[in-house]
Every structure is written in C-alpha cells, then in structure tokens.
Image (cartoon, helix red, strand yellow):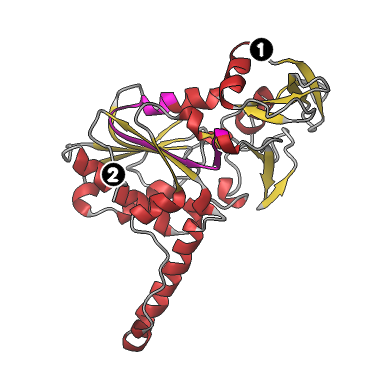
Amino acid sequence: MTHDWCGWRDATERALYGPGGFYTSGDGPGPAGHFRTSVHASPLYARALATLLCRVDAALGRPAELALIDVGAGRGELLTGVLAALPEPVCARVRPYAVERAPRPAGLDHRVTWLAELPAPGSLTGLLFANEWLDNVPVDVAETDEDGVPRRVLVRADGTERLGDPVTGADAEWLARWWPAPDESPGLRAEIGHPRDTAWARAVGTLRAGLAATADYAHTRDTRPPFGTLTGFREGREVPPVPDGTCDITAHVALDACAGPGAEHLTQRQALHALGIDGRRPPLSLASSDPAAYVRALGSAGAAAELTDPAGLGAFGWLLQPVGGTCTGLLGP
C-alpha cells in the first residue's frame, strides 16, 4: 500500500476518514489534542455563536423548532458551549445537530443528535455553522512542471510526491477561474478547491430558511499563495503532510469560490466584533471598586484579543450565506 501512487484528494480521504483514520478512529482527545481552534481557545467563541443564533431566531420570527447544526463537530465542544450560553427561552426551542464522521463521544448532552452525514436537503430551519471544516475537505494538488503546465501531484502514504498527468476537465476549469498561475514558473502549486465548493453548497442546502456560516483559514483570488498551503498538524505542531493517518492534513480554503449569491465575506475579527467580542480592556476604575470583577474582565479581554488578533485567529475568513431571504445583514452595524 505504501508504494501506491494517488492524488492528494484520495490520499487525504483515506488518511483522515478511512478505517482508523485521523478523525474516525475515535481514540484519544480528538482534534483538540493536536491543534488549537477558536472553539478551544475560549468560551467566548461559543458565546458569540449563541448571539448569532439568537439573531437568526429573531429574523426567522422565533420558530417553534430552531435547528443548530455544527458541521465538523469534533467532540461536540462548540455545541456544548452554545447551549450553555443561550437564554432559556431560546434554548428550549433549539434542536442541536452534530455532523461528524467520528463516533459520538461519551457523555455528550443527550439533546444533541449525532450524525455521520448532513441532514436531508431543505429539512431544517435555523443556523448551520462549520468551524474549520472546509479546510479538511480533501482536495487534489496541482504543480507546474518545467514547461509551466499544471500537473496533478501524486503522493504515497509516506509523503513522497511526484508529478502525474496534466490537469484537465473540471479541475482545469476551476484553476483557470479561481487560481490561475501568475506565470509559467516551474514549481508553482495550487489546491484544486471545487470539492469544497460542492461540499459547502450541500451544507447550505440543508436549510430551508436561516443562515449558513463557516469560519476557516482562507484566501481570495487576489491573495492566493503561489506555493499552496497543504500542511499537517500533530500534537500542536505543524508537520509535513504525510497521508498515513498519524496527522491532520489541511489546506486553506478559497472561500470566494465557495460563496453563493448574496453571501457576505468578512474576517473573524470583523464578525466577532459585530457579535460583541472586542477585546477591550476593562476600565482601571473597576480594579478599585471591584478587584475580582476586574480580574475576570481582564481575563475575558485577553481571550477576546486572541480570538480577534488580526495576525492570528482574527484573520480567519467567515462566509455568511443567508437562505430564504430573512437572515441578511445580521452582522451589520
């Protein structure tokens, strides 16, 4: 098996989601043991999502049943945090869904419906959220050869690569539209993102009304990295991407290619500021009047600053896709 060559899309699919794969083994701490996401950085992130869900609820006219779908739910940490942060009148109407290919974790809130696949198209009303999901949807990689021709990169399970056939068909069309090579220099790389476009369209299609939102490492057509972004993570460190199931394999997302009609694209810093997470330090006067409250507020400000840091998590891309015409402008002024 280690000597078989295939594209990065197939290799990543096996490594992450095959039998005993990085995400499907069900062993250990899950993704939180290997990399730090916004979900794990602070409960403020779940609080911001609770605020967004309340805005979606109001825009929908407070339906009798309000869906909250977490796509790429990990061990259910985000859903757990959002449910704890919601006001009771809203929480009583929420039906939470976790979409994750790993087994259901022990001890998860009984209210959470655990699914290996997305719910049926057009079946739910509410908020669908995907935090760092699309970057784990497997994609193929292209690299220009000595003549400037984009060729599919083939890989073995030990991470060894070689160039395969020229990129053709839908892959070539996607590259030409969304990630054209800036010149004909050899060695330029790109991740062919149309599987993510399809995956996001299917996720959005789960809703008959509401808002679909995703947050991820991202770039746009004018900021595509010339050598791609494919990498691995293990135990909190960036490592070479080796598709043997021992590390996460990820690549940044061309969010502009995923966007449908009426979508809003903004940074996490902008989104969280609009949801009340801004990282401002508490007034010094509070230290005198209520020292304990000052210490708590200072800790919260530090966590908010990490989530909104423009050189870190705050630079993540958020894509908001309203469904049904009512959930527009929810992060506006």
Q: Which of marks 1 and 2 is nearer the N terminus?
A: 1
Secondary element at image label 1: loop
Q: How far apart are marks 1 and 2 (CA)?
A: 40 Å
Under mark 1, the amino acid is: Thr
- Residue 278: x and y in percent read 40, 61
Task: Out of 152 and 66, give the one closest to the viewer.
Answer: 152
Q: What range is drawn magenta here?
A: 201-221
- Residue 211: x and y in percent read 32, 36
- Residue identifier under label 2: 330
| 314 left or right, relative to 235 | left
Task: Out of 9 and 101, give the one closest to the viewer.
Answer: 9
Task: Out of 73 and 211, give the one closest to the viewer.
Answer: 211
Give residue 168's mark.
1
Q: Does the magenta stretch include residue 174?
A: no
Asked if residue 238 shows in the view, the reply is yes
Q: Farthest top residue?
A: 169
